[in-house]
Amino acid sequence: MRRLRHAADLVSSFKQVAVDQTSVNRRKFDLHETVHEILLTMGPAIRMTHHSIECTIKKGIVLESFPGPFGQVLTNLVNNALLHAFDASSLGKITISATQRGATHVEITVQDDGSGIPAANLSRVFDPFFTTKLGKGGSGLGLNIVYNLVHEAPGGSITVASAPGSGACFTLVIPLTAPTS
């Protein structure tokens, strides 16, 4: 019964993520649960690497926003870290955390302990077609899509901080209630 319940929960999570990813519907959602569902759908891709993901988001941060675009943002940030942050022999770690900022915003960080971003590239990471992996799996569109999605539907912002050898940290600040226009 426990395994059947777990399987039913997985199917339900996959279904909700699939619905969210194919629509730009606004709804209330718990950030912890949504991130957990997104990471479940990414499980096979993550398990193909030697890297781990830790989510430290507590339950109870509720947004009235757009979980579909948020899911695309999170997926792109995790995939970007898996592709760019770690070399083939490293055992990398990605940490996803969130802190509510007052009654109006939430700050979400996606941080890796990888190789970091060279200072010369930091100002260009959100530019379209900028990639350091051209011909090796990078299109240069992932972070540009992230930037546009964060600024459009939820009305948020995104920044990046990094130092070579010290990983990268992407910080999103999103309103708990997305603007209506």
Image (cartoon, helix red, strand yellow):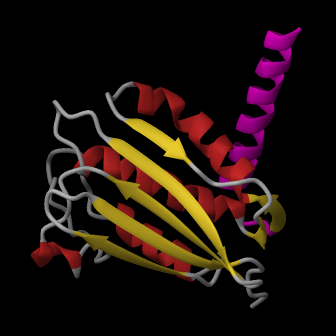
At 76% from the left and 64% from the top, the residue drawn is 61
Q: Please name whichever residue, 172 or 142, is drawn nearer the observer in this view of the structure.
A: 172
Q: Residue sitting at 74 percent across and 48 percent down?
A: 33
Instruction: Tell which of 130 and 101 is nearer to you.
Output: 101
Residue 78 in picture, x, y percent from top left: 42, 50
Q: Is residue 48 left or right of residue 29?
A: left
Residue occupying the far right of the picture: 1
Residue 163: image quadrant is bottom left
Position above or below: 82 against 6: below
Question: So how many labels did they put on this image?
Answer: 0
Q: Quadrant of the N terminus?
A: top right
- Residue 41 at x, y percent in the picture: 59, 36
Rendered view: 166 above or below 17: below
Magenta run includes residue 23: yes
Camera-nearest residue between 81 and 71: 81
State whether residue 175 is above or below residue 70.
below
- Residue 60: x, y in percent? 80, 59
Residue 105 percent coordinates (x, y): 68, 81
Image quadrant in which the C terminus is located: bottom right
Span highlighted in magenta in the image: 1-26
Q: Please identify the dominant SS of the magenta region.
A: helix
Among all residues in the image, which is located at the extreme bottom?
181
| Residue at (44% x, 55% y) in the render | 76
Q: Is residue 132 left or right of residue 62?
A: left
